[in-house]
Structure formats: structure tokens, C-alpha cells
């Protein structure tokens, strides 16, 4: 397996800036996220505080970022990272679609705003999962519920339905979805998760649903789940001015490290994180 110098998680301004700086420093990089970039970029109707681009629309800024990546021959690996494991001298990165290795990691995953459902963390890894494609094999002949906040969940549901007997699919977005025969489309609002008589139960405003397992598919994973052992300050990752976290060789930047939530702050921190990762790699090489 190729071991990259720096893996960067997230394709918002922080991750993109980190990737550009790391590439300029001749490091091998793995930029993981969405090829269409952070949805927060194109959502902005008018941005007035990005230097050099007065009154730019989010869509124009997105186009400019994509153009910059293309010019620098930086590609995005379309995947969502589930967990980053610190292995001592390197990091093992578990994505939905593949596993990766890198000598250092920059977490630029944006602000994690979702609140876990009551019971979610208690049953995580034991009835609750964040990745249907990773755990599909465990559901042979069983039933599962998928709660998805994104259209991408439909692909995961189709994959899971090849193994599972029955999949109940709850979209938390506006959908136009015609699912396979063993996927039932359900419109209910989840409130909590519990286990009853050995079965997982998704409580909803309307009642409850039961299955052998529950998948919660969101654009993001809580930082503390993403990197076990990561030091947090509320829902922000703790990082010093070099963007170094409490885990050696793992840096964080952008909205995930705290306010102000701004493009330039994110891009600036991405730059610092990449330079710090470069310095970390140079030091590691000497020892
Ligand atoms: C409507 C709107 C308007 C705004 N207007 C302005 C403005 O005018 N000026 C300004 O300065 N700021 C503005 N902002 C704020 C700005 O968008 C954010 O501060 C900025 O996008 C933060 O960048 P980031 O790279 O830290 O995170 P984000 O842009 O949130 O990017 C994080 C990326 O990481 C990805 N990701 C998360 N978890 C994972 C994972 N596990 N695996 C892979 N990828 C992952 C996410 O999908 C996302 O693409 C606005 C925000 C919104 C929503």
C-alpha cells in the first residue's frame, strides 16, 4: 500500500489550502473528500471578505478552487473517512471505499454541528454503524435501517440491499428515489436509538422501527470518533498555533478548530498545518 507523506481530510478552503502548500513543498499528498468540494463554498451567495476576489459568489469561488487544483495537478480521492488510527510512525486511515496510509494527517473536516441521537454513541460498533459499505457483510440475511442526510446514502443502501434481506431507508433530505425491491422508503423523523429484546430500535416522532442494525450516514463523523484519543474543547479540536493536535503528526485546521468560521481563517490555518506537517516529516526523517 502506498504510504503518502500527508493525508488531508476535507475539501473545504482549509483542506485545499493545505494540499496546495504541501504540494508546493514536494510532498506526496492524499486529499480525501468530495470532488465537488465543500458544500459550504457554493452555498454562499456573496462573499465579500476573500482577498483579491471582491463580491465573489460561492459558485465562482468553487470554480476558482477547482481550477487551482487542476493547474497544480492535485486530485481529490472521493471518499469519506471513518476513522484515523495513530500507529506510532504512521497513520492508518479507514475510508468508506478503501484504506490508506500516511506519515502525517491534516484534519480539515469542517465544523461538526450534528448532535448524536440519544443512544447513538452507546451502541456505536454494536448495533449502530456509520458506514454501510464497510459493514454490509455482517448483514447477510438480516435487516437494517439507514438514516441518511445525503443522497449518497442511496448508493450505500443499494449495496447493503445486496446482502441484507430488508433495508428501511429514511432520507433526511428532499429525495426523488426509486429504490430496489427490498428497500423500503420511509418518511419518519428519528429521535433516539435503543436496544429492545436483542433488536435495535430507532425511535421516531411517529413511533419506532426495528432491525438488526442501524446505519447513520452523515457528511461528517464527530471528530472524537474520527480520531480516537483526539483532544477536544467542546465540539472543536484542540490545536496550538502550529495547528498541532495532542496526537503527534496529526494536525487540524479550519472551522473544526473553532471560531471565527471564515474562509480566510480556514485557508490560513490550512497553510500553517501543511508547513507544520512538512517540518514534522523532516524531523521524523532525522530520527
Ligand atoms: C451559506 C454560508 C455562507 C458563508 N459565507 C461566508 C462568507 O461570506 N465569508 C466567510 O469568510 N465565510 C463564510 N462562510 C463560512 C465558510 O463557509 C466556512 O468558514 C469555511 O467553509 C470553513 O472551511 P473548512 O475547510 O474549515 O470546512 P468546510 O468548508 O466545512 O469543509 C470541510 C469538508 O470536509 C468534508 N469532510 C468532513 N468530514 C469528512 C470525512 N470524515 N471524510 C472526508 N471528508 C470529510 C466535508 O464534507 C467538507 O467538504 C459561509 C458559510 C455558509 C454555510
Image (tube, helix red, strand yellow):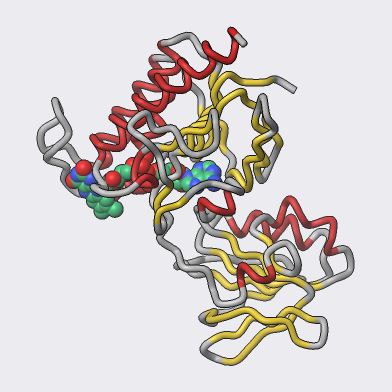
Q: Pick the residue in front: 7 or 68.
A: 7
Q: Judge whether 236 appears above or below 161 on screen.
A: above
Quadrant of residue 243 in the image? top left
Looking at the rendered image, the quarter that the C terminus falls into is: top right
Give how far across and how far down residue 204 sits, in percent. Answer: 56, 85
Identify the residue at horizontal 41%, vertical 14% (top origin): 72
Locate residue 155 relative to residue 39 in the image: left or right: right
Front residue (pair 267, 170): 267
Of all residues shown, which one is farthest toward the right?
Answer: 141
Near-viewer residue (69 or 222): 222
What residue lies at 62% left-to-right and 48% top-to-bottom?
Answer: 82
Image quarter of residue 148: bottom right
Task: Give the quarter of the image for residue 87.
Answer: top right
Taking the spot 84% from the left edge, 60% from the top edge, the residue there is 138
Location of residue 93 in the rendering, given as x and y in whole percent from the top left corner: 65, 37
| Residue depicted at 34% across the width and 24% down the height | 271
The number of discs equals 0
Q: Is residue 269 above or below residue 184?
A: above
* Quadrant the N terminus occupies: top right
In this rendering, does residue 187 appear at all? yes
Residue 94 horizontal side relative to residue 143, left or right: left
Give the side of residue 35 with respect to residue 13, left or right. Answer: right
Residue 241 in the image: x percent, y percent? 33, 32
Q: Is residue 44 in sight in this rendering?
A: no
Residue extending furthest toward the bottom: 207
Residue 197 at x, y percent in the picture: 81, 87
Is 3 situated above or below 149?
A: above
Amino acid at each position: 500500500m502506498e504510504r503518502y507523506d500527508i493525508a488531508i481530510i476535507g475539501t473545504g478552503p482549509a483542506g485545499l489550502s493545505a494540499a496546495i502548500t504541501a504540494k508546493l513543498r514536494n510532498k506526496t499528498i492524499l486529499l480525501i473528500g468530495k470532488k465537488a468540494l465543500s458544500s459550504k463554498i457554493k452555498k454562499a451567495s456573496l462573499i465579500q471578505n476573500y482577498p483579491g476576489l471582491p463580491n465573489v459568489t460561492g459558485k465562482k469561488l468553487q470554480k476558482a478552487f477547482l481550477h487551482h487544483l487542476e493547474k497544480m495537478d492535485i486530485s481529490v480521492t472521493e471518499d469519506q473517512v471513518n476513522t484515523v488510527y495513530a500507529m506510532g510512525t504512521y497513520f492508518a486511515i479507514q475510508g468508506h471505499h478503501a484504506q490508506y496510509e500516511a506519515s502525517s494527517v491534516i484534519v480539515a473536516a469542517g465544523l461538526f454541528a450534528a448532535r448524536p441521537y440519544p443512544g447513538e454513541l452507546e451502541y456505536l460498533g454494536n448495533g449502530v454503524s456509520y458506514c454501510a459499505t464497510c459493514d454490509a457483510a455482517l448483514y447477510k440475511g438480516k435487516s437494517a435501517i439507514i438514516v441518511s442526510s445525503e443522497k449518497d446514502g442511496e448508493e450505500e443502501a443499494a449495496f447493503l440491499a445486496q446482502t441484507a434481506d430488508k433495508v428501511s431507508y429514511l432520507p433526511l433530505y428532499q429525495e426523488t428515489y426509486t429504490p430496489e425491491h427490498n428497500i423500503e422508503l420511509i418518511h419518519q423523523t428519528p429521535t433516539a436509538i435503543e436496544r429492545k429484546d436483542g433488536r435495535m430500535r430507532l425511535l421516531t416522532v411517529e413511533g419506532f422501527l426495528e432491525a438488526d442494525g442501524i446505519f447513520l450516514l452523515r457528511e461528517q463523523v464527530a471528530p472524537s470518533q474520527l480520531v480516537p484519543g483526539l483532544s477536544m474543547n467542546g465540539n472543536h479540536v484542540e490545536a496550538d498555533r502550529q495547528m498541532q493536535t495532542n496526537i503527534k503528526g496529526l494536525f487540524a485546521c479550519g472551522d473544526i478548530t473553532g471560531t471565527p468560521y471564515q474562509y480566510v481563517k480556514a485557508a490560513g490555518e490550512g497553510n500553517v498545518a501543511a508547513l507544520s506537517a512538512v517540518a514534522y516529516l523532516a524531523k521524523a526523517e532525522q530520527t
